[in-house]
Image (spheres, rainbow, N blue to C red):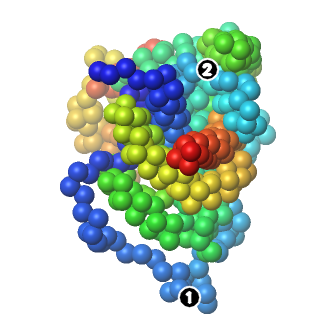
Amino acid sequence: MSEQPTEELDLIALMESRAQTYGLLSRLFRVEADRELLDEMRGMRFPTSTGNRHVDEGYKLLYTYLKGVWDDSVTELAIDYVRVFVGHGVNAFSAAYPFESVHTSERRLLMQEARDEVLATYRANNLKKGKWNEGEDHIALELEFMQVLCGRIAEALKADDEDAAIEMLNTQYNFLENHLINWVPMLVSEMLKFAKTDFYQGLGKLTLGFIETEEELLRDLLNDEMAEENK
Amino acid sequence: MSNMTRVEGFEFDNEFDPLEEEQEAFLDPEMIDDDNPDDIEEMPVIPNMPEGVVRKGVFDANNYDDARDALRALFEKNPGRKPTFLSIIEMCENGKPASEISREVDELQEHNYSVYAPMTLCRALERAGALVVDIPESAEEAETNDGVEYLEITEEVDPIWTATQEGLDVLKEEREGKGVKELFEADGTYLAIYKRVLEFCDEEPRTKKEIDLIVDHDPLVQSPRRYSNHFIELLEAAHALEWKNNKWTITELGKKTLATM
C-alpha cells in the first residue's frame, strides 16, 4: 500500500467525519430514537464552540437532553417525534413535514417536483431505494445520500482518484445548493415550533448549522481546487 | 459501522437502468379542484374540529376533583392492570428509583404481559395523582482536549418515584378488600357463584375451561345469561384472582375474603 501525503489523509479523515455526521442526522430523522441509540449518543463528546452558532446551540440542547436520559425517555421521544414530524391534523400545517416537496411546492403537497429531481440525482449516482417506502425527498434520505457520497469520496481519495473525488464533491455541492440549503431552514423553523423536547429542538438547530458549515466547506474545497487548476 | 451511521435507506445498484420508467402515480396540483372541499388540503386541523367530533381519552385525571377518585377511575378503566398499579404504589411508599421499578414491574407482569412500559404505567399513576417523580439535575461536565472544549456525559440519571398520600389511601382500602366488598354488594345475586369460583381456585390454580364447567350450567346464570368470564373478570378487577402460569390463581386477598364468606 503506497503512503499517502498528510494533507490527503486529513481530507480522507474529513470525509469520513462528514459521513458520520450525515449518518447520525439521517438516523435521527428517519425513525424514533431507541435506547441503544440514546446510549450510543451519550458516549459522544459535544463541542461547545465550533464557530457556528446553530451547531453550538444544537449540540448544547442535545447534550442537555441526553444527560438526563432515563427509563421514560424513549417513550417521551417517540411522542415528540410523532408530534414534530407526523402531526395529528389533516392539513399541511400540523407538523414539520420532513419532505422537501411540502416546503417547496406552492400547495405544500407531497411527491412534487423536488421528489422527481432528487430521485433523478439518486439514480444518476447509481442508488435506488432499499428499505425505504416513503417519498424519496425525505430529509433522512437526502442526508443519507450525502453520507454515501462522503464515503465514496473518501474511497476515491484512498485510491488516488482525485478527478472522481472532485466530481463527487461537485455533485454534493450542487445537491446541497439545489436541495438541502433550499428547504431545511424552513423545516427547522417548523421543527422549533412543534418540538417540546430539547432533543428535537437540538436536532433542528444542529442540522441547520451543519448544512451551513457544509456549504462553506464545499465552497472552500472546490475553490481551492479551481485555484490549483488555474495555476 | 455504528448504529448511528448505518446506511438504511439506499441500496447500491450495479445493474441500474437509468432509462427504466417509474411506475408510480404523481399527484398533479393542476388537477386539484379548489371548489371541491374534499379536494383541497386546507381542512381544519383536528384540535379545531367541532366539539362533538372530538373524542376524549378513556381516562382523564382532570375530570376528577380528588386524586382518590381519579385513581379509582383509572383502575376501573384498566381492570387488567389494577394489580400492577397497586403494586407500583406499594413499592413507591418510601420512594424507589425508576430502574428498580422497571425491573420489578417486568417480573410482576411476567404472566400477564402489558404493551405499556413500566414507566408508562407510572406516568398514568402520576397523572391520576398517586405518584410524584423527582428527576435530579445532573451536573455539566466540560473537558478541554487540544484546545477544544467538549461537554461529556458521565452520570446516569435514575429518578425517584414516590407514592402520594392519596395513592397510599386508595392502596390501603384496596388491600383491605374494599373492591371485593363493593363487588359482592353490587352483584350479590351471584354470591354463591363467586364463592364457588374462589373455593375452586383455592384448591389449585384453574384454567378457564375448568371454571366454565362449574359456572356455565348453573341455573342462576341462565337468565340473564352470564358466563364464567363475567365472574373471573370482576374477581380479577377486585384482585381476588390473578392470572399466573396460564391459570387463574387465588390471591391472598381472595383467600382472606373466602374465609369470611
Q: Nearer the viewer, residue B45 or A40?
A: A40
Three-letter amino acid code at disc 1? Asp
Dot 1 crowding, Cα within 10 Å, few <14, some 14–19, many 20+: few
Task: Tell me the quarter of the picture where residue B176 sits.
Answer: top right
In-image side of B24 versus B90 (left or right) = left
Tell me if residue A114 comes above or below residue B104 in the rendering.
below
Element on which disc 2 rests:
loop
**Residue A76 percent location from the top left of the image:** 60, 35
Badges 2 and 1, same chain:
no
Residue count near mark 2 (Cα–Cα under 10 Å), binned few <14, some 14–19, many ≥20:
some
Which quadrant is the N terminus of chain B positioned in? top left
Say which residue label 1 marks: B33
Q: Which mark is residue B219?
A: none
Q: Amino acid at mark 2?
A: Arg
The quadrant where residue B148 appears: top right
Name the secondary structure under disc 1: loop
Compared to A194, does B34 lie above or below?
Answer: below
**Residue in the image at 67% along x and 30% along y:** A59
How far from the left and from the top, in percent, is residue B221?
A: 34, 45
Q: Is residue B113 left or right of residue A91?
A: left
The residue indicated by pointer 2 is A45
Residue at x 50%, y 51% (from the top left corner): A170
Residue pictured at 65% horizontal, 23% vertical = A46
- Which chain does the residue under circle 2 lie in? A
> Which is nearer the eye, B203 or B108?
B108
Chain ID, mark 1? B
Q: Tell me which residue sits at (27%, 42%) in the image.
A: B216
Q: CA distance from mark 2 to mark 1?
A: 52 Å
